[in-house]
Amino acid sequence: MWRRVASLSPLVSSSKSRILNQVGCGLNACQVFTTRVLNPAEGGVSDRRRNPFVTFVLGGPGSGKGTQCTKIVETFGLTHLSAGDLLRKEISSNSENGSMILNTIKEGKIVPSEVTVKLIKKAIETSENDRFLIDGFPRSEENRIAYERVIGAEPDIVLFFDCPEQEMVKRVLNRNQGRIDDNIDTVKERLKVFAELNLPVIKHYSKKGKLYKIDGTGSEDEIFERVRPVFAALR
Ligand SMILES: Nc1ncnc2c1ncn2[C@@H]1O[C@H](COP(=O)(O)OP(=O)(O)OP(=O)(O)O)[C@@H](O)[C@H]1O
Ligand SMILES: Nc1ccn([C@@H]2O[C@H](COP(=O)(O)O)[C@@H](O)[C@H]2O)c(=O)n1
Ligand SMILES: [Mg+2]
């Protein structure tokens, strides 16, 4: 089991993006706190995986969440759960929510929390691992509250990849992975949704001292060297 309390030196970036100004909430937080809110009435996660170590990975569209998660998995062995990937799997498996999810993703909006939280809960419960990166979740306060109620715990830490909008748009439009939402109209909407609904979540975790803000500019390797100390300190 990983340590849940650690003291780290500041890792805050010096990026001056618009997002940083909007958050404006003293993101120098570098301590990991132990706040477990188990809620037996809701069931929480199953007994076997009752107390997993959870990192939420946040950032705007194209900020590099998935790319950095892959590197964290390779180096530190956490299991990567991408909320977007779980939702896309639902579409391709023709589940009852498939067409609703498809339309929501096309529009750059947020799928109802009950759907996404259920998929995350199942993925945690069926995993052999007890350490998770939950990528692209929570996207809104509604997502966050639903997760904490259903899973019965807060995340241990939260990573936020801070990247200028112009760079995020460039990366998304060059991604070339056939994603239905990688077009300029959807990206514009996703940026709006990020600013309106996701920044409040980031602010919430900053206030709780759980946030690690990482400068998301530079090469993939340069960014990973900013991420590495966060997990190295927990081993
Ligand atoms: N540091 C980087 N410099 C240049 N390109 C990058 C960098 N990091 C990631 N990319 C590329 O940018 C694109 C978006 O990266 P990624 O998929 O990791 O972002 P994301 O935050 O997961 O986005 P989304 O929220 O849309 O899923 C990918 O094509 C990836 O290869
Ligand atoms: N918590 C979430 C996560 C994602 N979505 C929808 O999926 C789209 C793609 O997500 P990525 O993380 O892969 O970028 C996103 O724009 C949302 O439409 C969601 O609803 N809730
Ligand atoms: Mg992604």
Image (tube, rainbow, N blue to C red):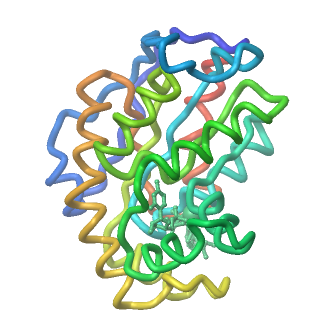
Quadrant containing ligand 1: bottom right
Q: Is residue 46 left or right of residue 153?
A: right
Horizontal and vertical percent position of residue 115: 51, 52
Q: Whole-percent x and y of residue 144? A: 37, 38
Q: Is residue 117 above or below residue 92?
A: above
The residue that appears at 74% across and 69% down in the rendered structure is 93
**Residue depicted at x 73% and y 35%:** 78
Which corner quadrant of the image does residue 85 belong to? bottom right
Quadrant including the C terminus = top right
14 lies left or right of 233: left
Residue 152 left/right relative to 45:
left
- Closest to the observer, 127 or 168: 127
Instruction: Please state the horizontal and vertical placement of residue 81, each as a whole percent of the image.
Output: 66, 47
Residue sitting at 74 percent across and 39 percent down? 79
Q: Quadrant of the N terminus?
A: top right
Residue at 61% x, 49% y is: 224
Quadrant of res 48: top right
